[in-house]
Amino acid sequence: MKAGKKQQQQQQTFMLIGAVVLLAVAGFVAIVVFSQNAIAERSGVDFSALETNRTPDGAFVLGNPDAPITVVEFADFACSHCQDYKSTVNQFIEEFVVTGLARFEYRLIANLGSDSTQYAKLAECAAELSGDDTNFWIAHEELYYYATSQRMSGDQAGRELAKKLNLNLSRLLECTQEAEQYQTDGALARSAGTSGTPAVRIRMGTWDETQTGTPQPINPSLTSGGVSIDVLRTTVENANRSS
């Protein structure tokens, strides 16, 4: 009896150890998967081949001026939900902006501290300093990548972005001292009724028809958070059918 009881205890111990090992392995896999998903990958889009514009209040817009719709994203480079949503933005740009069916307008939000603010200023200054709005979109790609793949501070991101765009670092940092587009975009976000980031709105009409005014929700139930690619697809297709 004693031998049987001892054997039973050993089996229970082995089962307990096995369960602990399985939990540890599962936790490790979850960490690896999360880390991979957390990286906001570059889209691979050739932004120099696309038309770029700025609204009268300074926002950056990408795509065909004759497209019947603009999709507007209010987002913060430091926001984890915005970082996760970047893959949907990539797909939207590739599927609808590159093909001329829609425009994409990005509004700089900086609500998460000094690095958040510096990232927004760097994006604006990438265009201002070079005189080329295409550089904003390259910076948009790079800054999301820096924030997620290497968790760079605002200062580190500035050094890397200057190298990437062949900009003078001192002049880039000087520009960030005066960059204020994020304040304009934050004010528009409030008037558009957003409650956090990301938030998606639309402007119906061509570029000439929709440069000003407050963008509207796709529908009353979609006032906060990222909008799925399926909803964006349906919205853009309906706009093009109606134009």
Image: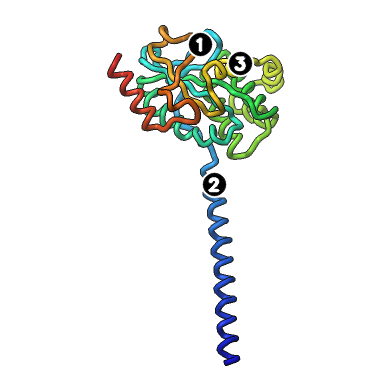
- Give the CA separation, mark 3 to mark 2: 32 Å
- As measured in the structure, the alpha-carbon distance from the residue carrying label 1 to the one carrying label 2 is 37 Å
Q: Is residue 130 visible?
A: no
**Which sits earlier in the primary sequence, circle 3 or circle 2?**
2
Compared with residue 37, is residue 242 higher up or lower down, i.e. above or below?
Answer: above
Q: Amino acid at mark 2?
A: Phe
Q: Tell me the kind of residue under disc 3.
A: Gln
Q: Is residue 59 visible?
A: yes
Say which of 37 and 126 sits in front. Answer: 37
- The residue under the point 54% across, 35% down is 81
Task: Please tell me in which quadrant of the rendered image residue 10 appears.
Answer: bottom right
Disc 2 crowd, CA 10 A, few/some/many (<14, 14-19, 20+): few
Q: Amino acid at mark 1?
A: Thr
Secondary structure beneath dot 3 equals helix
User: Can you say which quadrant of the picture contains the N terminus?
Assistant: bottom right
- Who is closer to the viewer here, 20 or 37? 20
Ranked by sequence position, the earlier of labels 1 and 3 is: 1
Report the residue marked by disc 2. Answer: 34
Which residue is disc 1 drawn over?
55
Judge by depth and name the residue closer to the eye, 53 or 241: 241
What is the x, y in percent for residue 70? 42, 18
- The answer for how far apart the CA atoms under marks 1 and 3 are is 11 Å
Q: Look at the picture and state if 228 lies above or below 5.
A: above
Q: Nearer the viewer, residue 165 or 174?
A: 174
Q: In the rendering, at what x and y percent does residue 188 appear?
A: 55, 15
Q: Specify the label residue 181 is tagged with.
A: 3
Q: Position of residue 32 (x, y in %)?
A: 55, 51
In terms of sequence position, does the residue under pointer 1 or pointer 2 come before the other?
A: 2
- Residue visible at 68% across and 19% down? 176
Query: Secondary structure beneath disc 1?
Result: loop
